[in-house]
Image (cartoon, rainbow, N blue to C red):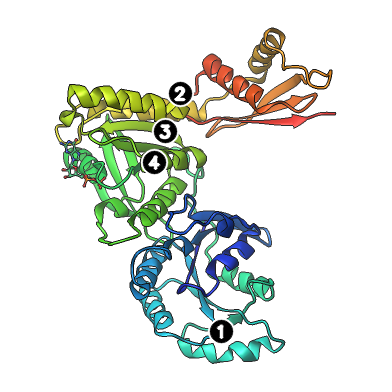
Amino acid sequence: LPVLAVVGRPNVGKSTLVNRIIGRREAVVEDRPGVTRDRVTYEAEWTGRRFKVVDTGGWEQDVLGIQASVAAQAEFAVEAADAVVLVVDATVGVTDADEAVVKLLRRAGKPVVLCANKVDGSSMEAEAAYLWSLGVGEPHPVSALHGRGTGDLLDAVLDALPEAPAETFGATVGGPRRIALIGRPNVGKSSLLNRAAGEERVVVHETAGTTRDPVDELIELGGKTWKFVDTAGIRRRVHLQGGADYYASLRTAAALERAEVAVVLIDVTEPISVQDTRIITMAVDAGRALVIAYNKWDLLDEERRFYLEREIEQELVQVRWAPRVNISARTGRHLEKLVPAVETALAGWESRVPTGKLNAFLGQLVASHPHPLRGGKQPRILFGTQAGTRPPRFVLFASGFLEAGYRRFIERRLREEFGFEGSPIHVSVRVRE
Ligand code: GDP
């Protein structure tokens, strides 16, 4: 999907506008000062077209001075975006911080839609007209709080956004499989990439057919060519004093968006952290196939290994289904195992269970493990079908509401029966009266 970034200095109403655009309240509600938001992108739709919205509001609580943070925030968000909404507070006028952002936007060359926010009066256009002076085109007067003018703004946004890029998720068939190499800073992503590319590099700097110029690299491994997506973020080190986490997750989200399979790198010399599990969760939530690579294995001693295995059991039980490889980007240890692991995960991701087989299995399961009685009634699964792949999605039709615990049980048994190694699966239930 095309990506829209909403930028502007603090307090101009970015979060309120993002909420208007996505039609939900969560972006602001979830906000806790000083805590990096888990989610940085949201899906939105306007007049039938879907796009992603990058919320840059989460970074404002960071430790940097305002001027620095606004500029850096804009720079990063814009890098990942196809178009930008610049929000200014029309009641305050043009500030130095606004002008700093405009400068950056001009350099980036992305389409900009100017949002003059907090225009609540009756003569909206007139009130915002002086913002032409910013030199980024027509100001669109908006009251994000009350919703006025947001429709017109979104029309302008859609004009600025490209149609969905040709190479979106799932659109290519037969080309090289797309891998997102992700993980928190310093786990060894760039080392691994160098190692892989250095030995068998085919093409570097192949630019994808989108306007947001992420660099992909084609690398031959195990006799096949693989496309490592959005490697610009791995190659180019950006030095930030604060907010690094936020931008790391922005990049991760962008890479996941375009990938089929995520290879998450974990540094075995350090305790598995919230950042690690958050990245894994992002991959799972994005519905991508998953491989977990434990890197820096050359540095592992007996004691650390003991704790590592315990941490894996405790922190990563939810993704027990992901193939695991223990590697060293430095020595090259077991790198050859990465390819089979990725292939396994992709196979699980694309696997399909025939309806007959699925229902035979469900029939047996329901007979041997019926849903607990509720209010004297027994909700039963009547029929199931696999509605899709990449990742596998199942729809179960039931005679009554199924408890969460029972749904999890079904999911677990589905895995035990049919595998899906390396892939998340979705099970949804429709109640048939
Ligand atoms: P990135 O931020 O994830 O791209 O991490 P880098 O690739 O820059 O690696 C961070 C540091 O870890 C560098 O000093 C690397 O040399 C080191 N490193 C990466 N992989 C390994 C490994 O397998 N073994 C050892 N001993 N060091 C590694």
Instruction: Give the side of residue 98 with respect to residue 163, left or right.
Output: left
Which residue position holds label 3? 290
- Distance, label 2 to label 1, CA atoms, is 53 Å
Quarter of the figure that contains the C terminus = top right
Instruction: Give the side of residue 377 with respect to residue 116, left or right.
Output: right
Of labels 4 and 1, earlier in sequence is 1
- Asked if the beta carbon under badge 2 is closer than 8 A to the nearest atom of ligand 1, the reply is no
Of labels 2 and 1, earlier in sequence is 1
Asked if residue 175 shows in the view, the reply is: no
Task: Please tell me whether mark 1 sits on a helix, a strand or a loop.
Answer: loop
Task: Please tell me whether mark 2 sits on a helix, a strand or a loop.
Answer: loop
Which residue position holds label 4? 274
Residue beneath the point at 84% across and 18% down? 376
- Asked if the beta carbon under badge 3 is closer than 8 A to the nearest atom of ligand 1, the reply is no
Q: Quadrant of residue 399?
A: top right
Q: Is residue 5 above or below residue 308?
A: below
Which mark is on residue 90?
1
Badge 2 amino acid:
Glu
Badge 4 amino acid:
Val
Which residue position holds label 2? 421
Q: Where is residue 17 in the image (x, y as percent from the top left)?
A: 59, 68
Dot 4 alpha-carbon crowd within 10 angstroms: few under 14, some 14 to 19, many 20 or more: few
Q: Position of residue 58 (x, y in %)?
A: 46, 60
